[in-house]
Amino acid sequence: MDNVKRAFDEKRPELTNRKGVVCHQDNAKLHLSLATRRKLYGLSWDIVLHLPYCPDLAPSDFYMFRNLQNTLMGKKFSYLEDWKKHLQHFLSMCH
């Protein structure tokens, strides 16, 4: 990890001079090990986790659908048009 950090610092300083690197971490057991998590924490990198067992789903999709799920909590739609309006409003807020 130290070599990766050095390479980022040298080759892409514009990415590391801001708040730091954002690391997209898949759910391979090695990547979830305590030693790996401690090292990433020590580097002050933000970690974006990937939904387990969904290699074809992009992390951005996962978080978008999670947010959509949160907006639907406790809501019941009597008409399909109401659901469509809710979805259109949600999608308009996403970009």
Image: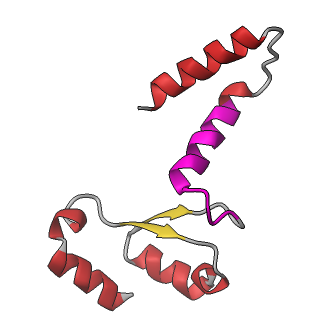
Residue 90 found in image quarter: top right
Q: Main secondary structure of the magenta part?
A: helix
Where is residue 60 drawn, in percent x and y? 51, 50
In this view, 47 is above or below 77 = below
Q: Is residue 63 left or right of residue 94?
A: right
Q: Residue at x 56, y 88 (%)?
A: 35
Residue 7 x %, y %: 24, 84
* Left or right: 32 as drawn, with respect to 15: right
Going by the picture, which residue comes out furthest to the bottom? Answer: 3
The answer to whether 32 is drawn above or below residue 23 in the figure is below
User: Who is closer to the viewer here, 40 or 90?
Assistant: 90
Question: What span is in magenta?
Answer: 54-70
Q: Is residue 29 magenta?
A: no
| Most foreground residue, 79 or 42 | 79
Q: Quadrant of the C terminus?
A: top left
Q: Is residue 86 above or below residue 31?
A: above
